[in-house]
Amino acid sequence: MFRKVLLASVALAACAAIAGAQNKPNFSGTWKMNATKSDFGAFPGPDSRTDKIDQTDAIVKEGVDAVGGPQGDQKYTLSYNLDGSETVNSPAPGLDIKSTAKWDGASLVVNSKLKFQDQDVTIKAVWTLSDDGKTFTQNAHLESAMGEIDQKIIFDKQEGGAASAASAPAAAAKGARPNLTGTWKLNVSKSDFGIMPPPDSQVDVIDHHDPVLMVKVSAEGSQGKQEYTINSTTDGKESTNQMMGQPVKSTTVWDGSNLVTNAKLSIQDNDISIKQIYLLSDDGKTLTINAHIVAGSMGEMDQKMIYEKQ
């Protein structure tokens, strides 16, 4: 049973990797619309617009702050899943936009549907990033009963915006909070489980959009195959998860670029506490989890789990 507890604790906040595949750009950053280079077609655009984008492997969020123009000042956030599944955004009361997003090579294609004044409107937007990462372009094609229109919105990268995927390892080394999304495989031979036998294999798949952290665990070993999902947040709020029939309460907080998780559970009238510290290598390829476990009458033990980015 204690072996199961250790497996469960490993997954509570498995951490730190760099978002994005090699051929997929990361649009994260603060972007200011270049009004002179943009073209809104027959529809006049805003006087100014600034977008703040936060992207992981699984999701991209676009915070829009537009000022002036015929629509007046607008401020809203759009969210898209990068696996092609549908999201619904409501940038204004009574306006629901259904969207799907998927990669086409190095471009992100966002297809949206909405109703405007009882008219069905479809929008296909293609996001591209310049080779130097300083220019972000949205090419949009809109269709409705009123006709079709093309628009091009060009944004310039602002200094001090979110770090790109390529710079994330360096940022983490300086104490920035890395994005935790990734697939991590336990290196059993390099890990040290103390007196407890290690699993034969374990893979943790993490979907992180701070402060939300979701971990899907798949492990095999002497206890058979174990699969479960852990949901928690990195803002210190307590979360409760059911893992292998046992409720586990935990809190997770940032300590510089590392996550610290404190978990509590009770098994066979024994109170168990687990403290884990997650360390990411400078190149973002190796995740080390150092755990200290206090298990009442069963004593204390330390473990070190080493994961490699897949």
Image (cartoon, grey):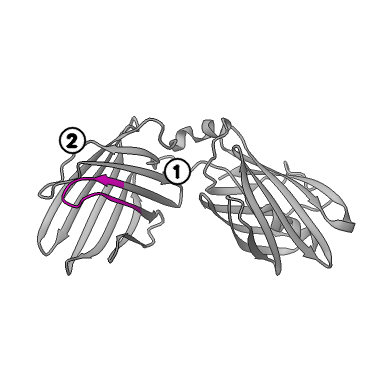
Residue 270 visible, this angle? yes
Query: Within the image, what quadrant is residue 147 found in?
Result: bottom left
CA neighbours of label 1 inside 10 A, class few (<14), some (14 to 19), many (20+) = few
Q: Is residue 261 left or right of residue 164?
A: right
Q: Residue at x 20, y 41 (%)?
A: 47
Query: Within the image, what quadrant is residue 192 found in?
Result: top right
Q: Is residue 82 left or right of residue 123?
A: right
Q: In the rendered image of this protein, does residue 38 appear above or below residue 64?
A: above
Q: Secondary structure at mark 1?
A: loop
Residue 96: x, y in percent?
A: 29, 64
Residue 222 visible, this angle? no
Residue 278: x, y in percent?
A: 65, 43
Task: State which tag comes first along the sequence, 1 or 2.
Answer: 1
> Mark 1 highlights which residue?
21
Residue 20: x, y in percent?
A: 45, 44
> Mark 2 highlights which residue?
37
Residue 42 on the magenta span: no
Q: Quadrant of the C terminus?
A: top right
Residue extending farthest to the right is 297
Q: Is residue 263 left or right of residue 310?
A: right
Q: In the rendered image of this protein, does residue 241 appear above or below residue 70?
A: below
Q: Secondary structure at mark 2?
A: loop
Q: Residue at x 17, y 34 (%)?
A: 36
Magenta range: 65-77
Residue 66 on the magenta span: yes
Residue 269: x, y in percent?
A: 84, 67
Amino acid type, label 1:
Ala
Amino acid type, label 2:
Lys
CA neighbours of label 2 inside 10 A, class few (<14), some (14 to 19), many (20+) = few
Q: In the rendered image of this protein, does residue 143 appear above or below residue 268?
A: above
In depth, the one of 89 and 110 nearer the eye is 89
Q: CA distance from mark 1 to mark 2?
A: 30 Å
